Image (tube, grey):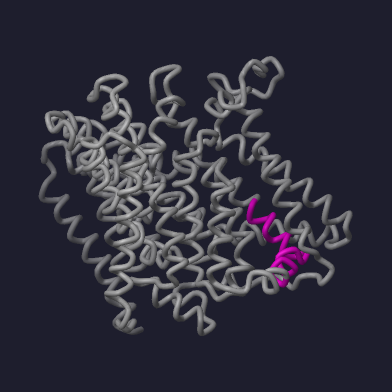
């Protein structure tokens, strides 16, 4: 075993032993609940993951640390907290998303077996012949699927992998393109599960209005799109992504990490056509949108499948504000899967037996994503036990006197919480009530503050290794998860820095279009400077 492989394992063992000694020596310390210590477990888990390039043990250590802090270092109570509040609640709370992941994995396996992906790849090789064309096509497709970020990550990956592979775009770059058009586009789409979530935290009847008012000032989401298009047209990369892209040009799409599941594809039939990929995907989108809409009309205090629960008076937007993606997406995915199997069997592209063989294959393909998502959700549960929102609220209230500088501070706070906890929804759920209480009702600065809260939530989520959308972007691209995180981070931080400056300027100008124009100009200038600075640098 080489030193490179031994050192990370030694670091993990040393860290666990060191923290155990700390626990033994500090049995009577003041409760960390509601203090800065509440953010310590996820920060350490993320740091270990980035340092050791190993996600599972790093996340598990973070969960155990959270349990120890939350229970006052009582070993018996810690085991109970980690098992029950951590992992059992993580699985039960996200079971619907796990089901949806597996269903999409099965759909992808079916499309591959039926020859749809092969046919689409051959078509793409004739019509999309450049990396620029493939990148722009991936970006545009990602923007079009704005209903839900989970759905976006996996659908865009399934459709665009053959195209990006043919044009020698690395899987890390594909994962970035998917991730950058998942949460950011959902955060500026009034008809999306994210708009519904934001609306639920605002005063009744004001949620959608506030969401729409915040869109022009959501600098992180909007400037991410400018960044992607400009970077693509300028034909350069920087940071770890540069190495991945250079290797992809030489035929290595992965550079490092385990990608056995991505390579082990079933032999496809030669009878498949391009529409054998397009029709199933469109059918999946339509059925899932309908399912989200229907569930939104049926949701009460708890889900009961009965006609008496159906509220026909709810409009499309209101139904989405009331929906539950963890119910609607697996429901729609299951219906779509049945329809897709019938379609492929009727077309005689696969037999019924071959279709059934795709079920375990689809599940196996999603196991890494499900494991990481389970660990990450358990870590979020531990952070919730430590009451991190109370610490954040107290910190922001003490900064209330800074007035026009407060949106920029809110942006940084939202970035930090979202990065540490891996959840945008949890972050703006904590911050929106605080932001609304700080600023005068209806003020422009208040709208900018709301935008800063939403933009920071997306930014931290985009950077975080334990974010569910980051995890599913890796799954959609079939890319090693930590490769995706390390290559995406410099790009996300570049846009975050520009967004921070924009939020500093915005309260003084109070004109969204002028501020956005300044942000676009800064993005272009920064990219030109980076290209010039990295032009002659070799990749290690």
Residue 43 lies in magenta, yes or no? no
Foreground residue among 71 and 173: 173
- The image shows residue 173, relative to residue 534, as above or below, that is above
Of residues 16 and 479, the one nearer the viewer is: 479
Left-right relation of 313 to 248: right
Magenta part of the chain: 104-122
Task: Report if residue 456 is visible in the image.
Answer: no
Residue 128 in view of the camera: yes
Q: Quadrant of residue 385?
A: top left
| Residue shown at 30% from the left, 59% from the top | 494
Residue 321 in the image, given as x and y percentages of width and height: 52, 27
Along the viewing direction, whichever of 377 and 316 lies nearer the viewer: 316
User: Can you give x and y, in whole percent of width and height, for residue 538 in the image?
Assistant: 32, 84
Side (left or right) of 350 relative to 46: right
In what quadrant of the picture does the C terminus appear? bottom left
Q: What residue is at 75 percent from the left and 68 percent from the top? A: 119
Q: Main secondary structure of the magenta part?
A: helix
Residue that appears at 64% across and 59% down? 159
In the image, what residue occupies the spot 54% across and 82% down? 251
- Place of residue 27 in the rendered image (x, y in percent of width and height, measured from the top left): 13, 44
Is residue 109 a member of the stretch shown in magenta?
A: yes
Would you identify the image quadrant in which residue 506 lies? top left
Is residue 245 shown above or below 106?
A: below
* Residue 166 percent across, percent down from the top left: 62, 74
Quadrant assignment for the N terminus = bottom left
């Amino acid at each position: 075993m080489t030193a490179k492989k031994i050192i990370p394992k030694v670091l993990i063992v040393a860290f666990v032993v060191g923290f155990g000694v700390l626990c033994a020596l500090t049995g009577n310390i003041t409760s960390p609940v509601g203090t800065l210590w509440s953010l310590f477990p996820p920060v350490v888990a993320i740091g270990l993951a980035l340092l050791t390039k190993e996600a599972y043990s790093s996340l598990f250590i973070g969960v155990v640390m959270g349990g120890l802090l939350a229970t006052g270092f009582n070993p018996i109570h810690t085991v109970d907290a980690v098992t029950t509040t951590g992992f059992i609640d993580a699985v039960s709370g996200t079971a619907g998303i796990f089901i949806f992941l597996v269903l999409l994995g099965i759909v992808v396996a079916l499309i591959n077996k039926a020859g749809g992906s092969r046919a689409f790849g051959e078509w793409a090789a004739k019509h999309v012949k450049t990396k620029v064309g493939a990148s722009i096509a991936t970006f545009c497709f990602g923007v079009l699927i704005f209903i839900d970020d989970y759905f976006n990550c996996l659908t865009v990956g399934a459709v665009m992998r053959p195209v990006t592979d043919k044009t020698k775009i690395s899987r890390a770059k594909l994962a970035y393109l998917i991730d950058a058009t998942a949460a950011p586009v959902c955060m500026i789409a009034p008809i999306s599960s994210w708009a519904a979530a934001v609306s639920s935290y605002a005063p009744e009847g004001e949620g959608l209005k506030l969401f729409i008012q915040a869109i022009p000032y959501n600098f992180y989401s909007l400037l991410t799109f400018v960044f992607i298009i400009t970077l693509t047209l300028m034909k350069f990369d920087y940071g770890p992504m540069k190495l991945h892209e250079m290797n992809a040009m030489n035929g290595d799409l992965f550079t490092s990490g385990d990608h056995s599941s991505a390579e082990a594809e079933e032999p496809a039939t030669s009878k498949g056509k391009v529409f054998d990929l397009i029709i199933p995907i469109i059918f999946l989108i339509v059925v899932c949108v309908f399912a989200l809409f229907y569930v939104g009309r049926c949701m009460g205090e708890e889900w009961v499948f009965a006609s008496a629960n159906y509220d026909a008076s709810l409009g499309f937007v209101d139904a989405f504000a009331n929906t539950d993606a963890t119910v609607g997406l697996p429901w729609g995915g299951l219906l779509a899967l049945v329809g897709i199997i019938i379609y492929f069997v009727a077309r005689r592209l696969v037999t019924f037996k071959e279709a059934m063989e795709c079920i375990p294959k689809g599940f196996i393909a999603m196991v890494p994503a499900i494991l990481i998502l389970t660990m990450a959700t358990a870590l979020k549960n531990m952070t919730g036990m430590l009451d991190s929102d109370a610490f954040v609220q107290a910190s922001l209230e003490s900064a209330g006197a800074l007035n026009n500088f407060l949106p920029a501070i809110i942006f940084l706070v939202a970035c930090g919480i979202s990065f540490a906890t891996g959840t945008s929804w949890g972050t703006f759920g904590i911050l929106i009530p605080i932001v609304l209480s700080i600023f005068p009702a209806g003020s422009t600065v208040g709208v900018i503050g709301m935008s800063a809260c939403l933009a920071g939530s997306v930014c931290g989520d985009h950077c975080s290794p334990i974010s569910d959308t980051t995890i599913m972007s890796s799954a959609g691209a079939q890319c090693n998860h930590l490769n995706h995180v390390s290559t995406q981070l410099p790009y996300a931080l570049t846009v975050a820095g520009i967004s921070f400056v924009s939020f500093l300027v915005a309260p003084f100008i109070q004109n969204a279009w002028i501020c956005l124009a300044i942000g676009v100009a800064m993005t272009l200038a920064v990219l030109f400077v980076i290209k010039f600075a990295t032009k002659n640098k070799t990749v290690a």
